Image (tube, helix red, strand yellow):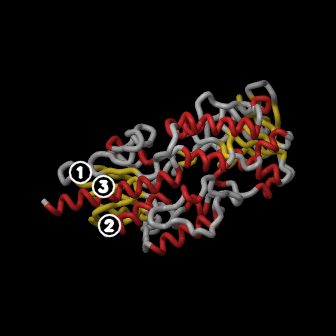
Amino acid sequence: MEEIVVLIVGAGPSGLATSACLSVHSIPHIILEKEDIYASLWKKRAYDRLKLHLAKEFCSLPFKPHSPDSPTYIPKDMFVDYLDDYVKTFNIQPKYQRHVESASYDEADGKWRIEAKNVLTGGVEVYVAEFLVVASGENSGKYIPELPGLDSFSGETLHSSEYKSGAKYENKEVLVVGCGNSGMEIAYDLSNYGVQTAIVIRNPVHVVTKETVRIGMIFSKYLPIFIVDIMAVLMSKILYGDLSKYGIRRPTKGPFYLKATAGRAPVIDVGTVAKIKSKEIKVVPAISSIDGKKVLFEDGAEREFDVIVFATGYRSVANNWLKDFKHVLNETGMPKNDFPHHWKGEKNLYCCGLSRRGLFGVSMDASAIADDIEKVVTEKMNK
């Protein structure tokens, strides 16, 4: 059994940022990571053409801004280099291949008991911590919806986390399910390789440019959200026109309002809309059923596909191992408290990176968590 002041679960950007902030306060801590490397989502499960969707000023971790000569929108590989340098700068040393199986609060001791399986040895390690930080992120478990007949599909199915490049699917018929940023960009990438591409767009979605989001985030510091939304929607109408005739409906609420209240990000267009307008990418409605390679849609149309890519997002799986999750999370594994108080729970339990505000939110959470822990530790020492 190992006793520690703070235990962090997860070595993605959330865990790394929290570790750095704790180190600045000289607070002892360890990180448990189930993979064999930190930032595994970025290093192993990101598609080749990915760039950060937000400008670099909104995508840095605490105490380390991006260099002035780096591009405004940083490519995946450059961001991975940034994370490598971040780990070296703060001497972050996670314990890898530790799969946390349970974490529960001991009322008698007033501490957290964490059990983790060492994948290398097969043994179970026990840790006791005064503070526990859930930093496994929003993207810890991939989500694929249950569709009638999906098991019968005779082609290839994959989650967007497994997708790398459209080069593999040249001359094939590919259906992308999901119209968020990943789905729209994957559809664009596939089309660039001459793939016959269709994308399922079920729900209304805002389509904006990167610069619209950047300007909106800056203006939202000084103006009411509804004013920023009016500006963003007007810019979208000017740039794209009426997209409803192409199967893309605009929500009634504004893009920044939806992001702030529901965590629903607008689609940042990388060129997909132009391909939809030119019919290089076909928009299709929701799937009714699947039979072999044949996919039946809700409008009655049928089409055969060789591949289905599910860009249907992720789910937090913290509730699977955090037995006393009710102290900080709800039943879906997301914070039970509203922003901006979401990061702090009861019994010295915290969550980082679950605000649905990307890397900007991660930095805010990590700083707040470390500051709060430092305050509690100092007060305890002074008693």
What's the residue at 63%, 61% (across, down)?
A: 74
- Residue 305 visible from this viewpoint: no
User: What residue occupies the far left of the structure in this picture?
Assistant: 383
Say which quarter of the image contains residue 252: top right
Task: Please tell me whether mark 3 sits on a helix, a strand or a loop.
Answer: helix
Task: Please tell me whether mark 2 sits on a helix, a strand or a loop.
Answer: loop
Instruction: Point out the image quarter for the C terminus.
Output: bottom left
Report the residue marked by disc 1: 106
Q: CA distance from mark 2 to mark 3?
A: 11 Å
Say which quarter of the image contains residue 280: top right
Compared with residue 279, is residue 9 higher up or lower down, i.e. above or below?
below
Task: Report whether 311 appears left or right of 41.
Answer: right
Report the residue marked by disc 3: 372
Relative depth, front residue between 243 and 331: 243
| Mark 1, other Cα within 10 Å: few <14 / some 14–19 / many ≥20 | few
Tag in front: 3 or 1: 3
Tag in front: 1 or 2: 2
Q: CA distance from mark 1 to mark 2?
A: 26 Å
Task: Please tell me whether mark 1 sits on a helix, a strand or a loop.
Answer: strand
What's the residue at 57%, 48% (across, down)?
A: 142
What kind of residue is marked 2?
His
Contact between marks 1 and 2 (CB within 8 A): the answer is: no
Counting residues from the N terminus, which is met first, the one under dot 2 or under dot 3?
2
Q: CA distance from mark 3 to mark 1?
A: 21 Å
Task: Report whether 83 appears left or right of 203.
Answer: left
Report the residue marked by disc 2: 25
